[in-house]
Structures are given as C-alpha cells and as structure tokens.
Image (spheres, rainbow, N blue to C red):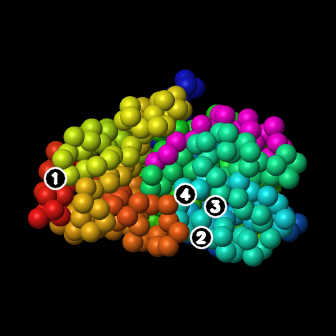
Amino acid sequence: MTKRPLHPRSLAAQAMGKIDPLTKGVVPPIHVSTTYIRDEDNAYSSGFIYGRPDNETVHEAQAVLAMLEEAKAGALLFGSGMAAATAVFQALSPGDHVVASKVMYWALRAWLLTEATRWGLKIEFVETDDLVALKAAVKPGVTKLIWAETPSNPLWTITDIAAVAEIAHAAGARLAVDSTCASPVHTRPLTLGADIVMHAATKVLNGHSDVVAGALCAREDDEFWARIKTVRKGQGGILGPFEAYLLMRGMRTLHVRQERQSASAMTLAQKLSAHPLVSRVLYPGLPQHPGHDIAARQMQGGFGYMLSIQVSGGEQAAIKAAAHVELYKRATSLGGVESLIEHRASIEGAGSPCPPDLLRLSTGIEDVEDLYADLDQALRAGHG
C-alpha cells in the first residue's frame, strides 16, 4: 500500500492491500491447511504450527479488524459472539467481582447469571449509563472488570465510555465494551479508554447474515490479553478459514453499508416519532433520547442501524404489527443487508428488561421510503 496515510474506509475496502503472491489476485485465497511442515531442526520458521491457532485467512481478517478498531495489541476471531464474550470472563479468576450492563444481549446475561456465577464470578448488574450507580457498584481492588454494552440491545441506552474507563481504572479494573451495534465505523472504544472491545461479528461486520463469528480487540498486549489468547487456543472456539474469508468480504464493504444503514435508521426514527400508532421511538440519534448528547460525542458519522419502537395498544398490537410486515423479515439477529423486525420480549422471556410493547428494528440497505411504508401499513393492520 501507499506510504501516505489512508482512511480506514480505503484500507478496509482493499483488505489492507493484501495481494496473493502466487497469482497476483486482488482477493486473498482461502487457506485451509490444518498442519504445517517442520524445519529439519523441528522448528517452525513459517510461524505456523497447527490449524487451530494458526491460519493465514483468519490472521488477515484479524488484521483488518485491528486496523478498524485501532487495536494496538491486535484482534482475535472466535467461532461466535458468545465465544468471544465468554472468553473475557473466563480469563478472570473465581471470586472476581464483575459489574455489567443491566441491559445487554440476553444470551450473555443468561450465561452470566448461570454458568459464570456457578464458576465463581460475582456478577452485579447496574445501569452503566448511570455513572453514580456504576461508581457505587464498583469495589476498588475487588472489581476486576466492567462490561458495558453501548448502544445496549434492545433499548439503545448509551454508556459514556471515557467516563466509565476512568471509573474502572481508578478502581484497578478493566473495561470491556460490546460495540456490536456501533461498529468501528461509528465508535472505537479503545481510543476512548476501554481495554477490550467485543463484536458479535455475525452482525454488521459480516453484514450478509451468512457467518456466525465473534471478535475481541485489545488496547494493550498485557497479561489479561495473554490469558484470553490461552482460553481461545485451549477451548478451540476459533473461526474457520471459510468463515474468516466471508467475514473479510463483509468488512470490505462495511463503511458503505453502515453509512447507508445508519442514515436510513435516522430517517425512520424521525418519521416514526410522528406516527400516530407509535408511542415511543428508542434511537440515540434523536435529540429527545436521554443518551443523545453522549452519543453525539462518542459516535462519529451516525448513530447506528438499530432502533426500537413501542407500539400504541400494547403487546398484542406490537405482535400483530410484526405479523403484517411484507418487506421486513420476522427474524432474529441484526446488521445484515436485509431489514429485520422482532418482538424481543417474546424471545427474551421472564426477567427481560424489554417492554412488552417493543419491536426491535434492524435497518438494512433497502430504500428507506419502502421500509417506512411497510412499517406504516403493518402498524395500521395491527390496530385493525
């Protein structure tokens, strides 16, 4: 690549300028070998030993993500977002105290309440956007990790990353941020003081709903990052080469997709705020959103592709509206090129902080007027 500084958009679009040395192909090949030749002295001068921790396709995708997140210590890819997230907690020790966002991805919250607690971690949930409550929950010298998700799924609350990083570090703890719904296009938590950033790469990083993957990026190559690497290698939750190739393909168009999706989400949020059958729109780009000012400070170029609406008429009206969409797809997940709609309370079940009248919307790349028209007719049908 050129010696001139390039925008991450350019670097991602060309996969860091990687050219296949054999064919000169502009798309790197998929490396599928699981084992590698030893040197005559039994060393591995290539640096590759075995396919579980060593795969060039995985390394190339990790390099692109590390560049996007400005991760000095690099990135690690995992077989799923849950594998990535749980690796952070498994790098802690039994008895360690953890403070985590009360509103977060429901499957991780369930794991923290069961497996992590059974293993010996002390988990305390707070509203991480409430700095007073957060600071009160943190125990200096005892709390080892603060886990914050921002924007948080599915209420899209905003946590002040820089402020929470200060609280964490003053107490001798680390800050890990789930930035799945912001993506490095809009927020780079490591530059704001976070120690670890996590992505469910299944979502917008891939962007095509055809890969299950997770990722971690680190600010410093310290002993905690080394433990995470050990967990990943020992438990084997590593992404395969074909999935890494598809993830790389997705990241090459990340900026184009994310910019379009975020612009459409903003338009939808504004139009739905005036809809007679919508009681509330949850989207950090709206001035009336309680976290808008912080989001405007720590998010660049947009406020993300996710929003939620609360439907007038309550739970049954919301479920009925979701049943009448034509362009939106009634499916879980988020971040793909197709727009999705989901009644989250039904999915999350008992104990969910999600209101029963809420519909979660993942904005794709379709025409935004078509998307609004579909929601409008579905909402009216839900009240028919």
What residue is disc 3 on? 85
Residue 104's mark? 4
Point 22% across, 68% down: residue: 320
- x and y percent of residue 373 in the render? 14, 51
Point 72% across, 62% down: residue: 123
Q: Earlier in the sequence, mark 2 or mark 3?
A: 3
Residue situated in front as seen by the camera: 199 or 106 = 106
| Type of amino acid at the residue the image marks with label 1 | Asp
Q: Tell me the CA gap for discs 2 and 3.
A: 13 Å
Residue situated in front as seen by the camera: 38 or 283 = 283
Determine contact: label 4, label 2, CB under 8 Å: no
The quarter of the picture where the C terminus appears is bottom left
| Type of amino acid at the residue the image marks with label 3 | Ala
Q: Earlier in the sequence, mark 2 or mark 1?
A: 2
Does residue 170 belong to the magenta stretch?
yes
What residue is disc 2 on? 110
Residue 345, by quadrant, is bottom left
The quarter of the picture where the N terminus appears is top right
Residue 57's mark? none
Q: Tell me the CA gap for discs 3 and 4.
A: 12 Å
Q: Secondary structure at mark 4?
A: loop
- x and y percent of residue 39 in the render? 81, 65
Stretch in magenta:
156-174
- x and y percent of residue 335 in the render? 39, 55
Look at discs 2 and 3 and give the one toward the viewer.
2
What residue is disc 1 on? 376
Q: Earlier in the sequence, mark 4 or mark 2?
A: 4
Q: Earlier in the sequence, mark 1 or mark 3?
A: 3
Look at discs 3 and 4 and give the one toward the viewer.
4
| Type of amino acid at the residue the image marks with label 2 | Ala
Q: Earlier in the sequence, mark 3 or mark 4?
A: 3
